[in-house]
Image (spheres, grey):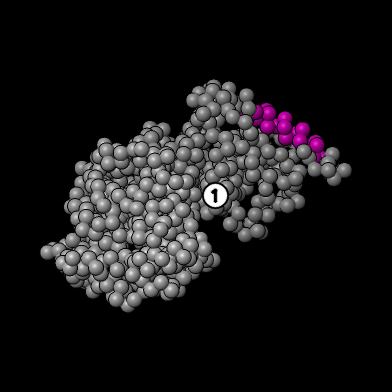
Amino acid sequence: MNHQHTPATAPDRGIDAVATTPEMDQYCVNVIKGLIMDAVRKANSGHTGGPMSSADFAYVLFREFYNYSPDDPLWFDRDRFVLSAGHESVLLYTLLMLIGYLDMSDLKQFRQLHSRTPGHPERELTPGVEATTGPLGQGFGMAAGMAIGEAILRATFGQDLVNHFTYVIASDGDLQEPITLATASLVGHLGVGRLIVFYDKNRIQLSGPTEHASSEDFAKVFEGFQWHVQEIDGHNHDEIRQAIINAREVTDRPSLIIGHTTIARGCATMEGSEKTHGEPLPPDEIRATKIKLGLPPDQTFYLPPSVVTHMRARHAELRQRQQAWKERVETFMRERPEDGRRWQQMLSGEIPPDLRYPDCTGKDKLATRVAFGDVLTELAHQVPGLVGGSADLEPSNMTAGFRRAVGQFSRTTPAGRCLIFGVREFPMGAICNGLALHGGLIPFGATFLVFSDYERAALRMAALQKLRVIHEFTHDSIFLGEDGPTHQPIEHLSALRAIPDFVVIRPADATETVTAVQVALEQHRPTAIILSRQALPVLDRQRYPSAENLRAGGYILYGAEDELPDIIYIATGSEVHLALQAAERLEGFKVRVVNLPSWELFEEQPEAYRNKILPPQARFRISLEAGSTHGWKRYTGSYGYEIGLDRFGASAPMNDLAKEFGFTVENVVQITLAKYAEYQRSQLSDVPVR
């Protein structure tokens, strides 16, 4: 067979106008497979079978359809490619080398320390990698967020400026993770187009055939989710091409291409074996496979120049595409200067210095969740890149004002910036990560603090990638009351604080909530703002220090800064007010109340500042937080005491719970006096309190 494949409308479809032959296509795929085998074998670690089964689709996509800049991996209107099957990273690295983003030396350092080719794709480490896709399913969720981001920006600025696709390779394991199906349900309902997922259905996973654990008909499942679905032979290049063309033409809903493939396709004797999933192939198998594929059997990392030339044949066309886009942007900026300024602001991610925020001073009481909602509404039009929503808790998370201001994103209103996530916390977190990864948008998600458990894996991936995502977690303690212990967070604050590069802020009142949002917008990492259901007193900032002090993570709220205190209360959120009341009851003592809304921000302050707030000589300290005491010892020290809750809550009105669990002024004062007396005795014998 020796025909040529030259589509009539090559530039429009993004397909290389340079003719190719089936023989050349297969030869390139074989070379890619040889590189995969050698890289995994050299590392003595990695996955061989999956990359070989996905190689045909990935080759056709990158060679003929995938639009990118040969010179700038971050060109804004590039297509996004997400390898949700992150264990197949060696396939992606091979392709990135073939298009010029990596070198052969990178491939030879696969899975080695400080290399650009780690065991799973990592954003900002490897040019051309759009997302850090580790745990299966999250790449799918992040890709959905990218596609939503493209849709919003295209509807806002027009397709002359924003006009690209998001491609995904997913595995059997991806589709077994519930996040994938929940995400697919949502984006199908929303009619998110330009999202094209190739499901490499090789029916093998680490433990063996997938039939041991799965028997779903995913074509029917995704059709039920309102996706455009095709089933093809995942090794047939003509079928792959046509499936991609068809999917690109269906822009009112996402597309799933189910590719029936064979793991380790092309292997001499191990084709179809689960033993190829997570291991290097034996040297004898590699040699025999290279002979079968027509490659030099004794040559490692074989890459003939003809394959490189073939893979880069579209570079001139791609450069022209990027240049034409730049000219359209220049025209847009010149002819629509106001919209141009907004375009620049959104793409840069910069926050205007003169934003207006609601003034909460002078109010008596206000729940911090209400204050957050007021800030969202106020910022809706001032920060045009702000996008997000609630996981079916809009009335409780106070995001309705934002929705009314910016409109709801849907298949008919793609410029709407409020996302109705439904009861899907984990997909919400992953989609927000994808929105941040896409660029041009600042995402937020909202739910109850107790449900942060559901999206924790996405929170971790946001921190790992240093993504500016704002998480609103309301109903922050047992004081939400009658819903009972299932809805009352206990260990959640300490669990969130355990995530590296993740900022947790629990403001004490409405004025601090306003500052917390400002701080979150300024971060280049995720932030969780922890908010109360109940109304809290709004601190008189004429009497107490400014809420701007929240930026330091901790500050002296009560007590003389220039004297050494006998007792230090350290508190967050609603318990700050409890600490203030207790401090005023302790006559005859020098008492300091330290408001510590963010451990992370506080720990980033100079040691001199931290020692000023918590003097090492002032050793008697009591922490107050209506949650787990885990971790508080770092601030209370050997001689201090922690007032918290190391058991589950109960179902009752808020005031009853406060009495039941000791969060009353009387109890705090009583504990303080008793423990201080113990502390004084311990100083005589130098035995710490406990």
> Residue 375 lies in magenta, yes or no?
no
How many marks are shown on the rendered structure?
Answer: 1
Q: Count residues near mark 1 (Cα–Cα under 10 Å), then give few for <14, some for 14-19, many for 20+.
A: some
Which residue was labeled with disc 1? 499
| Span highlighted in magenta in the image | 662-680
Nearer to the camera, 567 or 61:
61
Task: Look at 57% across and 35% down and name the residue there.
Answer: 490
Task: Look at 55% across and 30% down and name the residue there.
Answer: 478
Residue 412, visible in the rendered structure: yes
Left or right of 21: which side holds 35? right
Task: Look at 65% across and 54% down and name the residue there.
Answer: 610
Task: Look at 26% across and 52% down and name the residue there.
Answer: 233
Nearer to the camera, 217 or 149:
217
Left or right of 316: which side holds 53? right
Residue 232, compared with residue 447, is above or below; it is below
Residue 318, visible in the rendered structure: no
Quarter of the picture containing the C terminus is top right
Q: Main secondary structure of the magenta part?
A: helix
Nearer to the camera, 114 or 531:
114
Q: Quadrant of residue 123?
A: bottom left
Nearer to the camera, 120 or 150:
120
* Residue 388 x/y as whole percent: 36, 45
Left or right of 669: which side holds 683? right
Q: Which residue extends farthest bottom?
A: 305
Q: Quadrant of residue 73?
A: bottom left
Q: Mark 1 belongs to which amino acid?
A: Ile
* Residue 397 x/y as whole percent: 41, 36
Quarter of the picture containing the N terminus is bottom left
